[in-house]
Amino acid sequence: MIPKLPKILLYLLIALFALNMVQSYFTELIFDEAYYWYYAQNMAWGYFDHPPMVALMISLSSIFFDGELGVRFVSCILSVTTFLVLWQLIDHPKKERYGLHFFVLVFSMTLINAYGFFTLPDTPFLFFTALFLLLYKKFIARPSAILALGLGVVMAALMYSKYHAVLVILFTLLSNIKLVLNKYAWLSVATALLCYTPHFIWLFENDFVSIKYHLYERPNRAYEFSDFTLGYFINLVALFGFTFPWIYKSLFKTGAKDQFTKALLYLTYGVLIFFFVSSFNRRIQTQWIIVISIPMAIMAFHYLLENENAKKWIYRMGLANIAILLFLRVGLIYEPLFPVVYETHGNTRWVGDIKSRIGDMPVVFENSYRTAPMYAFYSGSPTYSLNNIMYRQNQYTIDDSESKVQHQKILYVSNYANSGDITLAWPDGTEFHGSYIDNFESFRKLRCYVAEENINLKKGKKLTLQVYNPYETNIALEKIKFGVAYLNDYKQVKEIIPLQAIPQREETTYLKARDTTKFSFTLPMPKMEDPGFFKISISENGLYMGINGDNIKLD
């Protein structure tokens, strides 16, 4: 049921929806959107980097529209709906007179503004966080089986949007620990788990690749205060722009007067503390903390209704934020107005330049899960991201895109090549090169496993390498070469050395299809001092070493 709204707020939300639709139509995709569009071309219960909600949104959008609007239509709907849910979450006798202030407060929040049309995992994450809080508010007032079922479905939707949703659920539970004794709360948990079961199955079938990457394989770097912890505090300011002093003051001034407000405080402080602690380990991205915008919007609006000074300055500074954000949104479309060359600028140009030279020929991009789908979106041609050991795994690692470019003439595009058959330029003027390969063949799905544990590099012990060939055909050993990559303690590749791996059966001349072949090897000594990890890699047909093994800790 749509809540009754003040006329000014209703008109503003209609205008917002129209604005986001126009913006969506005229703004080229950013690279992450292109990547998620690529997800949506093959709907599944999970993807390498994220759960499937963002892909579902794009799939639904494409039913109604083509092009960019076919990626962003559902985002435009969820944006306005998030405003409506937030309005319902506010209980205050004065709120009807301040619909304009409410709109200015929420629309001035930088990422809520941007995610009004961009289609990213945070778009549904924000919406379902607001909806979760609305149902939770109703649930603690009057628990029932219907509300428990609804809460369970929304919790699952949260988790299908972004894995960070576990923080929303966890901190809400911690604010009301007595829920563990509530039978309806357990019903909601059971419902959420049941709804989320398909994703659990997907994770199991894909060897928990997403979890393993984010927890164990993701590279990091040495701690830098300016970029890690100070950067975290800068992100806290960037989230709210000029209104940040009064919004954070509203947080400090809000007391846990009831169970729902206590949940808002636990959620906000919980996320802030969690990522503050995390900032001593890695750089925190602004969108990781965006979820606090939802409870903060509720608390800040309550605060401005009771505080004339806050009302005046949040309104004034909010308008200043909005003016800047609208100017930048125009710049997303009209490049000369934007201070830098951004991702929405010039994509149709560079794609069209390549397309005009090669026609429908498939394109293989080296180490670029971002440009490969962008080219596919605007050209309609097959693409593939060939990931090597200096890059990272992504959706192209686990899907069947590799098979679509095998044994074809392709254009191989690399940012690392100094020359090629064709030379082109990115929108910022940087040159890149492409080379033709007449019969492209890659084996990036070969997997390498080392049988032994507790490996000490200095002992020179003979080790066993198991290579699994998932392909339907045998692979001649003469087509592949082995290498070992040594990584520092932050899992950054620092040195790659050729590896002599000897088949344990002398007559072995190929990797048997759908089977495992065993080799013996000894780790060569690296030049670097005290490597923290190593991984085994394979080069096929002269291509740069691939990502074929996991990081293995050295004792």
Image (tube, rainbow, N blue to C red):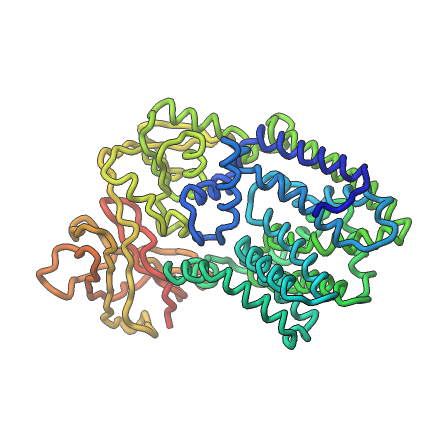
Q: Residue furthest right?
A: 308
As drawn, 170 above or below 318: below
Q: Is residue 18 visible?
A: yes
Percent of width and height locating residue 109:
71, 45
Q: Quadrant of the rendered structure where residue 276 is?
A: bottom right
- Residue closest to the eye, 320 or 151: 151
Q: Residue at x 35, y 41 (%)?
A: 384
| Residue drawn where x is 65% and y is 62% of the image | 147
Tell me if residue 146 comes above or below residue 473 in the rendering. below
Q: Residue furthest left?
A: 507
Q: Residue furthest bottom?
A: 181
- Residue 388, position as x, y percentages in the image: 35, 49
Q: Is residue 436 left or right of residue 99?
A: left
Residue 224 in sight from this viewpoint: no
The image shows residue 542 at horizontal and vertical percentages of 24, 44
**Quadrant in the picture for residue 78:** top right
Residue 158 image position (x, y, % from top left):
58, 56
For the C terminus, give its image quadrant.
bottom left
Q: How many marks?
A: 0
Q: Is residue 524 left or right of residue 551?
A: left
Compared with residue 486, is residue 473 higher up or lower down, i.e. above or below?
above
Please name whichever residue, 227 or 370, is drawn nearer the observer in this view of the structure: 370
Question: Hey, which quadrant is residue 117 in on the image?
Answer: top right
Which residue is drawn at the image coordinates 26% and 71% (left, top)? 460
From the viewer's perspective, tell me whether residue 199 is left or right of residue 329: left
